[in-house]
Structure formats: structure tokens, C-alpha cells
Image (spheres, rainbow, N blue to C red):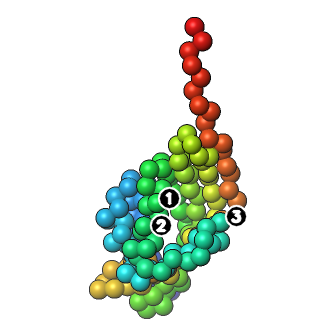
Amino acid sequence: MTSNDEIRDRLAICDLKARYCRLLDTKQWDAWRELFTEDYVLDVSGSGGGPAIHGREAAMASVLSSIRDAVTAHQVHFPEITLNGDEALAVFPMQDRVLWGPARPSITGYGHYHDRLVRRHGEWKIAALKLTRLHVDVAPAPAAPKGDAS
């Protein structure tokens, strides 16, 4: 039987991931930064990115350089969560839409977030995130507007 503490932890982890998506998509960078531990590890190698990035500030710089000006919409779905005291592993099925603008194709990705979470001072934080993609739809950049022919 599931204890009340386990239910609270699971809900807190789900709330954390929901904030992750909302703050990322609404570009609330300072609040988004606070969701991660200082020694956070970001690994997007399984989705076409480079090697893992170590450290919250380095990861933030990488994300900002990629999507600061993009329109994004991230969704996560029912997670699998394994709790072990003040640590947890979670796999969130995900979908994201990224529109960079007229100079670059947009994408819709489908895959999973594999998160390692830790409880610090009573609050859950993301200590590591690995993004894997199963499929990516790429839409060409919109054509440049043509001059008025009249």
C-alpha cells in the first residue's frame, strides 16, 4: 500500500515537472533556474545534441543560446516514478514544439525525459535530465514574403 508520504512525494515531483514546462515556455529564466541543483547535469545527446553538460549555469547558458527567442510548448505525460528516500528517478513521456522563426525549421519532438531528482531542504530538485527522442517532425522555415504584385 502506498503511504501518504509517498503520494506527497509523487505529487511534488509531478508539480516540479509541470513548473519546468511552464517556466521554460514562458521564459521565466530565474524561476526556471531554481528547479535544478547547482551540480545539475543536462544530457541531450540522445536527441541529437552534443555531450552532457555539467553544472546548472553551463546548462542554462546552453538552453538559452538555443531557445531564448524561440516559441516553445513542452508537454509531459503520466510519469513512472521510483522513490528511494531523498532521491527519485522519473521517466516522463514528452512532446515539444519549437519554433525558431523564419530563418530556421521548426520541430515537434516525441520522446522521454529521464530525470534524477533529489530532495534538498525539503524541496525536490532536478539533479540530472536526459532527453531521448523517438521521433522528430521537422517543418521547413516559412518562405520569405513576396512583394506586392499589384
Q: Which residue is mark 3?
A: 134
Q: CA distance from mark 1 to mark 3?
A: 20 Å
Classify 104 as above or below 59: above
Q: Secondary structure at mark 2?
A: helix
Nearest the viewer among 133 and 123 is 133
Q: Is residue 79 above or below residue 69?
A: below
Is 9 or 22 nearer to us in this picture?
Answer: 22
The reply to whether residue 45 is in sight is yes
| Residue, disc 1 | 66
Mark 2: amino acid: Ser
Q: Secondary structure at mark 1?
A: helix
Instruction: For label 2, count other residues whose C-alpha is less than 10 Å away and answer few (under 14), some (14-19) or many (20+).
Output: some
Please name the residue that numbered disc 2 is placed on. Answer: 62
Q: Secondary structure at mark 3?
A: strand
* Point 70% across, 64% down: residue: 134
* Farthest bottom residue in view: 85
Q: Which image quadrant for residue 33? A: bottom left
Amino acid type, label 1: Ser
Q: Amino acid at mark 3?
A: Leu
